[in-house]
Image (tube, helix red, strand yellow):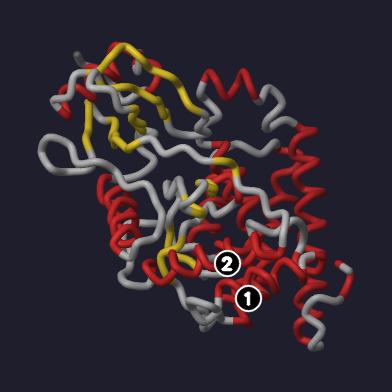
Amino acid sequence: MNMVADFEHLTPEVLLDIVEGATGIPMTGLTIPLPSYINRVYEIQARRGERLIVKFYRPRRWSREAIEDEHRFLADCAEAEIPVVCPLPLADDSTLGCADGIFFALFPKRAGREFEQNTDEDWRRVGRLVARIHLAGERRTSRDRITLHPEKSTRGDLTLLIKGGFITHRYLREFEDLTSSIVQNITPLFDEIGFIRIHGDCHRNNMLDRPGEGLMAIDFDDMMMGPPVHDLWMLLPDHAGRSRREIDLLLDGYEQFREFDYPSLRLIEPLRFMRIIYFLAWLARQKDDYAFQANHPDWGGEIFWQREISDLKHQFQVIMEHKVAWEEGRFFGGGEE
């Protein structure tokens, strides 16, 4: 059965045919859609009993080589005995299939509780896990993934938003001038910072707490080359200036396995800005999807961009206060306190 590279044609019958053809394993009719912002993910069941997860990657988002980088990173983590979920080999011994333009992979189902950082030791546990992931990450580079840098990834996202007609005429110039100023100010902070393979989307919803086994990191779909601190700041409950205790605990656990570059802490608020821009561009790429339009009817309107610019101005203020605090030797001081 053929389909074009479009999720609208990915019916239960089609996806089960694809999986059976790629694995040679007969499936039951079970297809349970799972939450995924950008891909299509389903829980399915083989007739012999085991539950599996199949992930169909959004067409035109990643190249084959970029997805293979994700799978290689997972394999490196597994080899280092880091709890992750690796893709299963298909009938041709590869881990990545393609059906008429849509890449897909099959994973074993792994259940667990959503992780909650309630105690000091919980924060240390996360720090230890992230450090181990980074030890695996620094083993090799990734040529086909995003490099998280203001003049690379962020500049590309801004070009998409500005040149792509996503910003209303009223706010276009203000958005362009504001973001250009922020990029100009934060780019020098990335000088002499080490870049390795990182998870890229390391928040607590991508951590599972498995009784008797510990923490497991899931969803490496956004893996990238970036500064290791990026995998730590997204776990924080607030801006850096109001998260000193949590940072200390994370690094206490982290440094049990890997040395941390403390000057890179000054990247936390710039990285938060870069994440805002990344998320705006990520949504812009989905703007024409029917489901997106139904779920985000006000996206891209006058009120939307007025609010976004206000948020970006506030973030710029935080960045500059943070920068001054660092230069004056009071890194967690300034206007954030």
Residue at 23%, 22% (x, y): give it: 48
Q: Quadrant of the N terminus?
A: top left
Pointer 2 residue: 127
Instruction: Give the percent coordinates (x, y) of residue 162.
Output: 60, 46
Asked if one can make out residue 161 in the rendered structure from this viewpoint, the answer is no
Please tell me in which quadrant of the rendered image residue 188 appears: bottom right
Residue type at mark 1 is: Asp
Taking depth in this image into account, of 133 and 230 the one nearest to the observer is 133
Relative to 337, say whether 296 is above or below.
above
Within 10 angstroms of label 1, few (less than 14), some, or many (20 or more) residues?
A: some
Q: Quadrant of the C terminus?
A: bottom right
Pointer 1 residue: 252
Classify mark 1: helix, strand or loop. helix
Relative to 34, say whether 221 is above or below.
below
Residue at 43%, 55% (x, y): give it: 223
Residue at 75%, 53% (x, y): give it: 312
Taking depth in this image into account, of 254 and 7 the one nearest to the observer is 254
Disc 2 vs disc 1: Cβ atoms closer than 8 Å? yes
Instruction: Give the percent coordinates (x, y) of residue 43.
Output: 39, 25
Residue at 51%, 83% (x, y): give it: 192
Q: Among all residues in the image, which is located at the extreme front?
A: 212
Within 10 angstroms of label 2, few (less than 14), some, or many (20 or more) residues?
A: many
Position of 38 with respect to 13 (left or right) is right
Asked if one can make out residue 24 in the rendered structure from this viewpoint, the answer is yes
Return the mark for residue 202: none
